[in-house]
Image: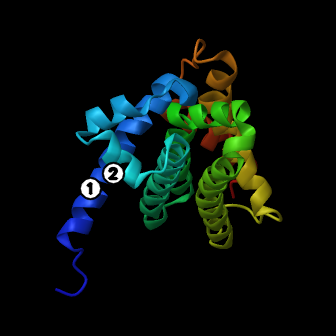
Amino acid sequence: MHGTVPAPAAHCEAKRQLIVRHARAHFVREGYCSTRIEPIAREAGVSTATLYTLFQGKAALFAAVIDDAAEEFARQMAHVRAAEGDARTTLTSIAEAYATFMGDPFVRSVFRLVVAERPRFQAVARRFFEKGRTEFGGTLIGAIVRLSEAGALRPIEHPSWAAGHLMGMVEHPVFFVPLVTGEEVRVRRSNAEIVAGAVDTFLARYGA
C-alpha cells in the first residue's frame, strides 16, 4: 500500500528507537566514557552485532541519541505553537516548555560532555543546542511580535532582546544552577513557580 513502511524497515526502525531510548538512559546516568555498548544491546533485546549494524559505534549512537532528543523537543514546541491565548497564557506555555527542556538532566549531560569531549562532539552538540534555541527562540519571538501588534504588549523595538530576557530568567535556575553545582544544589522553586515569576517580571517590563 502506498505510504506504508515495509514490515522489515518498520521492524528495523523499532529496534533502532528502542536502542536509542536505552542508550539515552545510560549516557545520562554514566556519562559517555563509562557507557558500554553491551548492556545497552542486552536491555534493548538485540545482539551487539545488530546494534553495530544500526550504529557504527558508540560515538554514532551518542549522536543519534542527541538528534533524537532534539527532535523530541521540536515536537514539544509544535504543540506550544498551536496554543494561543492572552499574553500571560501564551508566554507561560512557551516558558514552561523551555523550562522542561532546559531542566532535563540529559540536556545538562550533553553540555558537560561537550565541555569534556569538545573535539569529538562539537558539531553534534552545536546542532542540538541550535535546534533547541531556534525552536524555542523563534517561537517566542514570533509570539512577542504577535502580542505586541495586538496591543497585548507594548511596542518592542528588539523582540529578540525581549525573548532573551525571558529565556535568561528561566535558564538560570533550571539549567545553570544545577550545572555549576553538579546537581548538588537545586533551586527550591518548582518549574511552574520559576516560570510564573519570570512571566510576571517580563510583563512588568513589556506589558501594555
Q: Residue 208, can we see it?
A: yes
Q: In which quarter of the image is residue 154?
A: bottom right
Choose between 51 and 87: the one closer to the eye: 51
- Give the number of the disc on residue 14: 1
Q: Where is residue 49 in the image (x, y as percent from the top left)?
A: 33, 45
Judging from the image, what secondary structure is the residue with disc 1 in?
Answer: helix
Q: Are marks 1 and 2 in contact (CB under 8 Å)?
A: yes
Label 1, label 2: how many angstroms apart (C-alpha)? 5 Å
Point out the image quarter for the N terminus: bottom left
> Quick one: label 1, few (<14), some, or many (20+) residues within 10 Å?
few
Position of 183 with respect to 54 (left or right) is right
Choose between 175 and 117: the one closer to the eye: 117
Q: Which residue is drawn at 39% across and 54% down?
A: 54
Mark 2, residue position: 17
Q: Which residue is drawn at 65% across and 47% down?
A: 125
Three-letter residue code for mark 2:
Gln
